[in-house]
Image (tube, grey):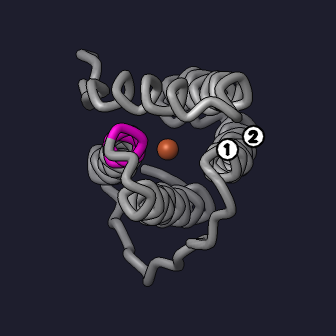
Amino acid sequence: MLSEKLLNEINKQIKYELESAHYYVAMEAYFDSQDLPGFANFFKVQAEEERFHAQKFYDFVYEMDGDVELTGLELVGKEFDSCVDVFKKALEHEKFVTSRIYELMEIAEDEKEYATQSMLKWFVDEQVEEENSMKDMIVKLERVEKSPNGLYMLDKELAGRTFTPEAE
Ligand SMILES: [Fe+2]
């Protein structure tokens, strides 16, 4: 059984994960509007990952005999200046999510709630990957900044990205 405090915070996290998905769909749309289908696909997959994260928290709540409470989603932003601007905003957003996961972990540690700590451990590792994938893309984009050909190649490469939830 989860404490009320922890349950509330996990419910908030479900909202944040779904808002992340929402934000990434806005990024997908930006790239589709720029005729960059590979980059759009990158964020389509990213949004799928976020829904998967939300589902993981959702499943955990019911495993722990809690109840999920949904609230309305907000769109974090939808104005972007350039390709690299999108990835910089995505990185900032992932950093925010990481700080949220750490807050949850701190509460679970204070409460000696080991099941929650174990579940969160997966997210701690996942956030390292999420931040790194955004950082990688920023480096790649800065490298091809003034080369339409480089951008085209990168777009082609990203078209192949697919969502594969890892086996647990
Ligand atoms: Fe996430």
Mark 2 crowdedness (10 Å alpha carbons): few <14, some 14-19, many ≥20: few
Magenta residues span 38-46
Q: Disc number at residue 73?
A: none
Q: Say which of 100 and 134 sits in front.
A: 134
The percent coordinates of residue 127 (x first, y second) are 60, 31
Residue 2 lies within the magenta run: no
* Residue at point 62%, 33% (across, down): 134
The percent coordinates of residue 72 (x first, y second) are 44, 83
Q: Which residue is mark 2?
A: 106
* Residue at point 73%, 48% (across, down): 92
The percent coordinates of residue 94 (x first, y second) are 64, 44
Type of amino acid at the residue the image marks with label 1: Val
Query: What is the magenta segment's predominant secondary structure?
Result: helix
Q: Which residue is mark 1?
A: 84
Q: Say which of 114 and 92 sits in front.
A: 92
- Residue at disc 2, secondary structure: helix
* Residue at point 53%, 61% (across, down): 16
Quadrant showing the C terminus: top left
The percent coordinates of residue 58 (x first, y second) are 33, 53
Q: Is residue 109 left or right of residue 133?
A: right
Q: Are marks 2 and 1 in contact (CB under 8 Å)?
A: no
